[in-house]
Image: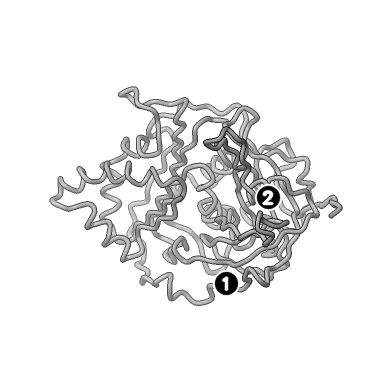
Amino acid sequence: MASAAVTASVSVPTSKSSSLLPAKTSISSTDRINFNKISLYPRNVSTSLKPGSIKAQVTTETPAKVEKVSKKNEEGVVTNKFKPKTPYTGRCLLNTKITGDDAPGETWHMVFSTEGEVPYREGQSIGVIADGIDKNGKPHKLRLYSIASSALGDFGDSKTVSLCVKRLVYTNDQGEIVKGVCSNFLCDLKPGSEVKITGPVGKEMLMPKDPNATIIMLGTGTGIAPFRSFLWKMFFEKHDDYKFNGLAWLFLGVPTSSSLLYKEEFEKMKEIAPDNFRLDFAVSREQKNEKGEKMYIQTRMAEYAEELWELLKKDNTYVYMCGLKGMEKGIDDIMVSLAAKDGIDWLTYKKELKRAEQWNVEVY
């Protein structure tokens, strides 16, 4: 398939930038810019962040209470419109590496055309079927990826979907280098290339309807994808029926500063909404806590343990966790002792949060 040069429409700064940031809080499809000239990976990242150094002030006003609506019963959420035997064929509009050259592994941000035929919500996933056949001569099985764009898409016209994909390459027990079929297919896509898409799927990670909610987002690596979709809706877009007035608190864990994904976007959000957005990074190979321990996501959260526990006792606080499965146990370890101080069994309480759709997990 011959690749074609594609010029995308979105409102972004015209100065040299390393993120897909809109110049204004509502995305316009009238401003045009060639994304081939934009680099998304962070440069000159400072890892000397201290607890509270990027911190929001929370309003003391009591917001109007919003009746909870189960995500499973939410109207208008489309699932499984396209299935493996009848996938939607989109085209790659943009594919760019967003990690530094010295990062341990490559992560790519990619945008596919959908022409509005794959309607999705923030927090859903799509399936991708790589070209070619497997060792048995059958089409490759689909792989699911969390969507990294808001429902409007990166270009603001509801006609695209974006993914954040890490290239999988590892050495097996026989000493052979193995490349993940779908991740390498996606990371190698050129603008204009076709891609088979299924879905959308999933309701577990849908955003809460309450615009006054506290939303705590815990992500490692490409687990940032659904949170980027949340935050674009909250801070980069204007909606007639939605204005976020609550608190969004993002914890992002990565191995090195050159692995921080969408850093400049998140810092821009902090400028736009300093009272509504808190941002904390955990860079495990470069940062340590006061005890000299490596800074994993649960280590960073431990620095705010008491505050997080108080938030978790409120019925309008929602926790979303996406990424490596190992972080869940570390977070449980923090909460067990805190809950015990109030005479609460954490694991039982967490089950109650799950039933109330306030504890949402998508790990691998």
Q: Secondary structure at mark 1?
A: loop
Left or right side of 134 for 203: left
Provide the residue designation for mark 2.
186
Residue in view at x 73 percent, y 40 percent: 38
* Residue 281 x/y as whole percent: 46, 36
Residue occupying image coordinates x 60% and y 26%: 44
Label of residue 80 in the image? 1
Residue 249 at least partly seen? no
Residues at discs 1 and 2 in contact (Cβ within 8 Å): no
Secondary structure found at label 2: helix
Give residue 63's quadrant in the image.
bottom left
Q: In the picture shown, does residue 93 fall above or below 70?
A: above
Determine the residue located farthest toward the left in the rendered image.
343
Q: Please say if 47 is above or below 200.
A: above
Give, as a three-letter code, the residue at label 1.
Asn
Q: To which quarter of the image does residue 232 belong? A: bottom right
Q: Is residue 333 left or right of residue 271?
A: left
- Is 93 in front, or is 329? 329
Nearer to us in this view, 150 or 128 = 128
Inspect the image, locate mark 2, and give the three-letter code of the amino acid beneath it. Leu
**Residue located 20% across and 48% down the image:** 339
Task: Pick the residue in front: 30 or 138.
Answer: 138
Name the image quarter holding residue 239.
bottom right
- Viewed as shown, does residue 74 lie left or right of 106? left
Q: Earlier in the sequence, mark 1 or mark 2?
A: 1
Location of the N terminus (image quadrant): bottom right
Q: Is residue 358 shown left or right of residue 33?
A: left
